[in-house]
Image (cartoon, rainbow, N blue to C red):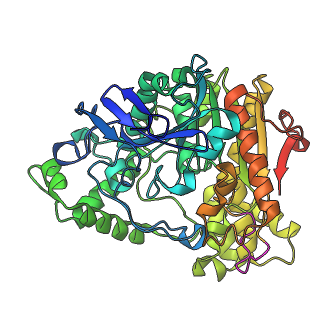
Amino acid sequence: MNVMNHPVVDTESGSVQGTVQDGIAAYRGIPYAASPVADLRFAAPQQHPKWPGLRDAAQVGPSVPQDASRLEAVMGPRTPDWNEDGSLTVNVWTPRLPGDSSAERARPVLVWFHGGGFTSGSGGWDWYDGSNLAAAGDIIVVTANYRIGPLGYLYLPELGVENLGVQDQGAVLAWVKRNIGSFGGDPEDITVGGQSAGAFSSLYLAASPVTGPLIKRVITQSGPLGLAPQDPEEAAEHARRFVEILGLSGSLDLLAGLRAVPADQLLAAYRQLGGELSRPGNVAPPMFPVLGASGIPATWQQALSDGRLNGKQLLTGTTRNEMTSFFAFDPRIQAITADQARSIVATQLDDGAHRYDQTAAQQHTAAPSDVITELETEILFRDGTLVVADHQAAAGYATYVYQFDYTPADDPKHLGAAHCSELPFFFNTIDAYPDSPMLGRPTAEARHLAHTFAHAVAAFVATGRPADNRWQPYESGNAATVRHFA
């Protein structure tokens, strides 16, 4: 065995053998928790048993059970790769190689959680390959799977079933704390980050009394902070209907019944529930983190007020046209009238009708579909992002804010800088998106932008400051200090 090309690292559960490419060692598909199957389905994550000998870590593990993403039309399609058994894994990219003379210097660590509306996604997909990002800042990058959909967010607290996906994420951070030193990482220098649902998760992980102390820095990309954690009563009602769809209402042993249902039937029931709950303008999934359950003791607004993010450095931002990803292909939105659009916003905010009128007046030639798309971008993503940034900056903590404005030259659906469009640039993985409308045909300029963006965020993980002279610290309320990437 060539140790240089197949490096071995010892973890708490056994040894893993990785691969090396371009000076970065990758260890993929490492279990951080036992398989969530049989009696461990709908149970809190349990430590993975030790394995004998050497475990091959050349390939990622399977995704957790899921349907296709609702954003495939924007991001591009993926071949289903899920398997409940063996799905709770992490992937680690590290610049530390065997014989590395700098091995005594522990590297900063980024733990990054994927998006997907708490319903789809995988940390193992090549979209989120961490090798280029690790190389850009001499950092260690960790991505992870966590349970999603009904397997992650079914709410049956009387059976001990609540926020299992959040618990998985906490288990990832705990695993990193215990094991990352073996990969050359510094367990005292952890940044937690993520995009969309992963950004929502990262902020709450950083604010949690349990996981917050493990985290030094936070990165939130397009966090849907206008979406409050799910109300327990609503979550309980959705769980009741889900059980009813499965034909398990009145079951004497509901938990055993749920554990016996094939995963694809759980997904089919969740799909039906989602269809029943679907309303124009509402992008919330049927099940997502529940307020008051594990890991979500309070809203992020309350956490800010309580000082739960004190001392943490922040890099945060949005894309310019977030909501085109959700609305451009929705015929209900494209055909919406001004009165209907105004009514939707009025139910969301006390001054919603007034804000709609203001936005419509500013875009006086725009169709109602364009007005509500712009306004929902602000309500769901940008407003909350700036509130958090304003708070951290005003308190004197290093804060950096971006807006991603890159638009593909070939944009027939007029997506603009859509939700998720910064991901190929963040990881510098443009070639992993061959059929992505949000990226279009990559140009030399796009590749240069990916190099710039990835190096900037990697340096933030390493030092707390982006490696970009144009990216100045954010000043509370000062739009001129938002870094625009185009």
Q: Which span is picked out in magenta?
A: 409-417
Q: Magenta stretch mostly in which secondary structure? A: loop
Residue 485 seen in render:
yes
Which residue sits at x=74%, y=73%? 370
Figure quadrant of the N terminus? top left
**Image location (x, y in percent) of residue 426:** 68, 49
Outermost residue on the front side: it is: 1
* Of residues 318 and 8, the one drawn nearer to the viewer in this rendering: 8
* Of residues 46 and 358, the one drawn nearer to the viewer in this rendering: 46
Residue 249 seen in render:
no
* Of residues 251 and 459, the one drawn nearer to the viewer in this rendering: 459
Which residue sits at x=34%, y=70%? 272
Outermost residue on the left side: it is: 252
- The stretch drawn in magenta includes residue 416: yes
Left or right of residue 191, residue 276 in this image: left
Which residue sits at x=66%, y=21%? 310
Q: Quadrant of residue 82?
A: bottom left
Left or right of residue 394, residue 224 in this image: left
In the rendered image of this protein, does residue 457 appear above or below residue 282?
above
Figure quadrant of the C terminus? bottom right
**Image location (x, y in percent) of residue 212:** 53, 25
Left or right of residue 111, residue 234 in this image: left
Left or right of residue 99, residue 421 in this image: right
Outermost residue on the top side: it is: 104
- The stretch drawn in magenta includes residue 235: no
**Image location (x, y in percent) of residue 201:** 52, 41
